[in-house]
Amino acid sequence: MANRFKKVLVTGGAGYVGSLLIPQLLDQGYEVISYDIQFFGDDFLPKNDPKLTSVKGDIRDTAALSEALKGCDAVINLACISNDASFELNESLSETINFDAFEPMVIAAKAAGVKRFVYASSSSVYGVSDAPDVKEDHPLLPLTLYNKFKGMCEPLLFQHQSPDFVCVTIRPATVCGYGPRQRLDLSVNILTNHAINNGKITVFGGDQLRPNLHIQDMCNLYKLLLEVEDEKIAGETFNAGYQNQSIMDIAKIVKKVVEQEMPELGDIELVTTPSDDNRSYHINSDKIADKIGFRPAHSIEDAVRDLVIAFKADKLPEPMTDDFYYNVKRLKTINAS
């Protein structure tokens, strides 16, 4: 079956999810432009593929972005200063990239003739909720500037929704598992790294509930959003998560899988310590299953196993010290602005 769209621009294409998604889009026959500021480089992208163009660009540079958008008919917008802790950084960096640049980018995409715009928001927009099931109509209660700006961009996008510019927002759970531009600053990945390389898992708090989504399911969803009919997604917002687990339960899964896969490590110690990170919410992802048939197929166990395989294959050298795996550390090191 021919692809509905021919040329896709992925902002943040050299990030954690983009690094796994882009090769899969190329395999499906799409022409792909990765538009990324490349704080982490782009050496892990398949740049020898003639269908890929890797552009080192800043989404705040609307003129350069407009140039890159020429001939594109779909945008997957992943670019942002990502995760809550990144706001330890220069606040204006996060505000200008995650909020100020957003609507000009949407307007530029529409002007370039883009037909579909997929926005990666975040399920962290819900903040803390003791609701048993957080659905898309739950109030947004952001605890950090990251959550706040993610939520504030959603209505800005939908102001530009039209029959020939179909807009959809995804609120993904915390992504986990192995990607070519690996992140080791996300809950499942952090705990797995420490289990393997410290022989000890430290759980901060433990009772907080967090929704999780395997990176391959995240990629499968973006691919699906390039295929589904306009009317199923136009102007819609979808939660996208799989297993809602407490941080302690995630730690127990990590301990079990790592001990199974790497028995030479022996018994992995599990310790708890207080935490000031009280984000806790349990998202419901029934809507996306009902509307477009998206059902995740990969578990937290799968994510941990994939990371174990990557560590065993020496794909993740210096995992405790190299800032390549840690967004905030890298941005501080290079004094990003």
Image (cartoon, grey):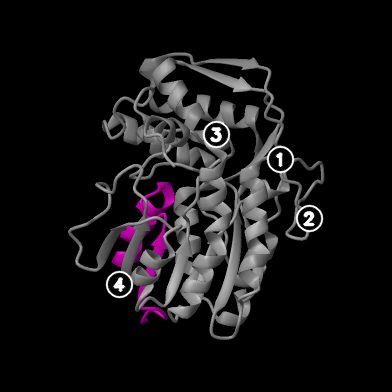
Asked whether disc 3 touches disc 2, contact meaning CB atoms under 8 Å apart, the reply is no
Image coordinates of residue 335 in percent, x first then y, are 41, 34
In percent of the image, x 53 and y 69: which residue is there? 106
Write the start and end of the magenta stretch as one range: 1-30
**Residue at the disc numbered 4:** 29
**Residue at the disc numbered 2:** 138
Mark 4: amino acid = Gly
Image coordinates of residue 265 in percent, x first then y, are 39, 16
- Real-space Cα separation, disc 4 to disc 3, in angstroms: 33 Å
In percent of the image, x 37 and y 34: which residue is there? 334
Residue 187 is marked as 3
Is residue 169 toward the left or the right of residue 55 in the image? Answer: right
First in sequence: mark 1 vs mark 3: 1
Q: Is residue 303 magenta?
A: no
Compared with residue 297, is residue 182 higher up or lower down, i.e. above or below? above
The crowd level at tag 3 (other Cα within 10 Å; few <14, some 14-19, many 20+) is: some
